[in-house]
Image (cartoon, helix red, strand yellow):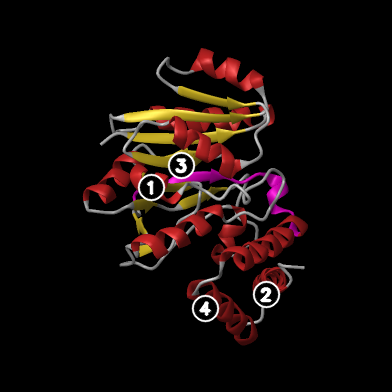
Amino acid sequence: MRVSTIISTYDWSRFGVFKRALRSVERQTYDDVEIVLAIDNDPDIVEVVRELASEDVVVDFDPDGTGLAEARNRGAAAASGDVYAFLDDDCVASPRWVESLVEGYEDGAIAVGGPSIPDWPNSRPWYLPEEFDWLVGGGPYPPDGVTELRNTYGSNISFRADVFDHLGGFDESLGKNDDLTQSEETELCNRMAAEYGRGVRFQRDAVVSHRVFPEQLRPGHLIRRAYAQGRSKRLVGAGDEERAFLADVLKSTVAHPSPESVASLTYTAATGAGYLLGDS
């Protein structure tokens, strides 16, 4: 089974983390890996990549790229694998990442993902409880025994190529540049569930670490991110998991008030406001 790993990037300022992502894919324990790089806007990145990477790395460049969803779709169109595995440019894949994904496909899955673990600049801030790691791209962390989810995050998700192509890829109206309203992977997985009646196989060993930048931890940014996530759920549809999660946070805050629970309530309120006002 050939796996095409697709990494998208768009700006020279991200080249340091992008290079780490590329190196992590080059060092996988699984042999049959194709590397596809979808690069937007900055031709300097293309030049340096061609010097650093091996000759068989596929590079797709668009000087006028419009966002992550479009770049991922271009990467998939340039790929030749049986599986498309998507990795963000600020992530580092564990050595067995691809091997673990393949184990899911060998067991009959049509989409496979795993957890994204936050790589903190120093340490976890007190005002960001683990259940809100999704604000900085961390998660999901389902209970033991859960083997299928509606979706994992776009930083660590893969699809059988024929399934992805049949569904038409990611919705390019989502995941635009400089727009916190994303959730294109949720929208795609909703369509996959409607078409195939299947979710994403969760492989706990298919781990990536996701770099968290200091500016992402500013309280104002976290609140804006929560609001944008609420808007995203309004656009693509919230499921029972989200509604149950928000209800649990509210109950916990009332039962056990603390600075941490107040922070949780703030993010919950921002998410709810985004959901309620998402069409306005």
Question: Disc 1 marks which residue?
Answer: 159
Magenta-span inclusion, residue 217: yes
Q: Residue at x 50, y 53 (%)?
A: 153
Q: Earlier in the sequence, mark 2 or mark 4?
A: 4
Label 3: state its secondary structure: strand
The residues bearing labels 2 and 4 have C-alpha atoms spaced at a distance of 14 Å
- Measuring from the top left, give residue 271's x and y in whole percent: 67, 69
Query: Which amino acid, by three-letter code, is at mark 2?
Result: Leu
**Can residue 144 be seen from the camera position used here?**
yes
Which one is in front, 76 or 86? Answer: 76
Q: Earlier in the sequence, mark 4 or mark 1?
A: 1
Query: Which amino acid, by three-letter code, is at mark 3?
Result: Phe
Q: Residue at x 29, y 54 (%)?
A: 109
Front label number (1 vs 3): 1
The residues bearing labels 1 and 3 have C-alpha atoms spaced at a distance of 9 Å
Up-down: is 168 above or below 223?
A: above
Which residues are the magenta region?
A: 205-219
Q: Earlier in the sequence, mark 4 or mark 3?
A: 3
- Measuring from the top left, give residue 47's x and y in whole percent: 59, 15
- Measuring from the top left, give residue 177's x and y in whole percent: 69, 43
Question: Disc 3 marks which residue?
Answer: 86
Query: Which amino acid, by three-letter code, is at mark 1?
Result: Phe
